Image (spheres, helix red, strand yellow):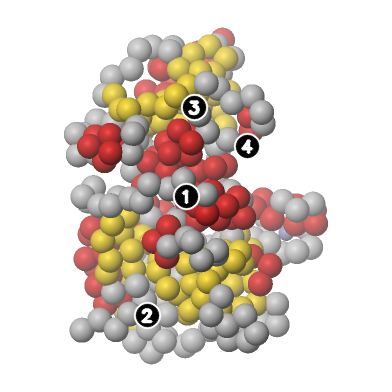
Amino acid sequence: MRAIVLESGRFRLEENYPTPEPAVDEALVRVRLAAVCGTDLELARGYYTFSGIPGHEFVGEIAEGASKGQRVVADINVGCAQCEACLGGNVHHCRSRSVLGIKHRAGAFAEFVVVPKRNLVPVRASISDEAAALAEPVAAALRVLEPFGDHLPDKALVIGAGRLGFLVAQVLQRQGIEVTVFIRSDARRSQLANAGLSSCDAVDDAAWPWIIETSGAEGGLALAERAIAPQGTITLKSTIASPTRLDLQALMVNEVRLLGSRCGDLVAAEAWLGAGHLRPPTSIRFGLHEIEQAIEAARSSEWQKIFIEPNRAWT
Ligand SMILES: [Zn+2]
Ligand SMILES: [Zn+2]
């Protein structure tokens, strides 16, 4: 099969990569559409030592057997099925987990990907491929709500309007939370306005009960520290790869909660998409042979989402 391989920080196309063979509890999935995300760019910069086929945001269809043709999305975390976390249903925190396209497991920038059957979630017909390919980041965005249970703050500041920030803002908006997005550049302001989201480029000190940091920039975290209200919550929703300084004394005195937040529930994400909540991001599509252009486009802020279409016949 044709596949993109990431090795030593470089993406390259392999024309004759061996098609993976599923074990009995796995399914062979033909990838319909995959999306490039910030994590893929981080992988290329060495955030994890990963080599192999990247790609963890995708929609595909079962390639063989009784369910052939069924469209599916997948939880990308594959647990060992034996440890305390796995047996307790908390696969996302299995210490020996593999993660599709991120850690010890081939991903979706290829014609086919193998996925454990228990990780697959069927996609209803009303959801387009473009929307379904975002199920994984939508699940991650929905995850920010979970620690609050029924007691969600009534307003929130989202820092950053990148691919994930845009989804987080939409999730909060649909939840009835008064949401403002902090952005420095004007480039995304109109995209936010089109989605009915308000934005700002300056914030008052100690004003926000909830701040979700999605920018991944050191300045983003510093801003969150300054703008968080006493007893507020800062949710960390992006990988800040460089070591960061925090004023721990201020966080302690003001009783601020600092919460990490990673992957979410794919079943909930599919239902959220099925309810028609997503405002589709601006996007562009590439073939596998155009991986360099795709990565370049992902590094620029012109498009909100970069899709790769592994099975289309490109000329
Ligand atoms: Zn991602
Ligand atoms: Zn486990």
Decide which of tag 2 and tag 4 comes sooner along the chain. 4
Q: Residues within 10 Å of mark 3 (few under 14, many from 20)?
A: some
Q: Please tell me which residue is depicted at 21% across the width and 50% down the height of the picture.
A: 302
**Which of pointers 2 and 1 indicates the residue nearer the eye?**
1
Q: Nearer the viewer, residue 238 or 31?
A: 31
The secondary element bearing badge 2 is classed as: loop
Q: Is residue 195 left or right of residue 97?
A: left
- Asked if the residue under mark 1 is in contact with the one under mark 3, i.e. CB atoms within 8 Å, the reply is no
- The quadrant of the rendering that contains the C terminus is bottom left
Mark 1 within 8 Å of ligand 1, using the beta carbon: no
**Residue behind mark 2:** 311
**Residue behind mark 1:** 276
Decide which of tag 2 and tag 3 comes sooner along the chain. 3
Q: Residues within 10 Å of mark 1 (few under 14, many from 20)?
A: few
**Residue behind mark 3:** 177
x and y percentages locating residue 27 in the rendered image: 61, 78
**Which of pointers 3 and 1 indicates the residue nearer the eye?**
1
**Looking at the picture, which amino acid does disc 3 mark?**
Ile
Q: Nearer the viewer, residue 41 or 181?
A: 181
**Which of pointers 4 and 3 indicates the residue nearer the eye?**
3
**Residue behind mark 4:** 146
The secondary element bearing badge 3 is classed as: loop
x and y percentages locating residue 290 in the rendered image: 24, 72
Decide which of tag 3 and tag 1 comes sooner along the chain. 3
Disc 1 from disc 4: Cα separation: 21 Å
Q: Is residue 297 visible?
A: yes
Decide which of tag 1 and tag 4 comes sooner along the chain. 4
**Looking at the picture, which amino acid does disc 4 mark?**
Glu
Q: Please tell me which residue is depicted at 33% across the width and 63% down the height of the picture.
A: 307
Q: Quadrant of residue 218?
A: top left
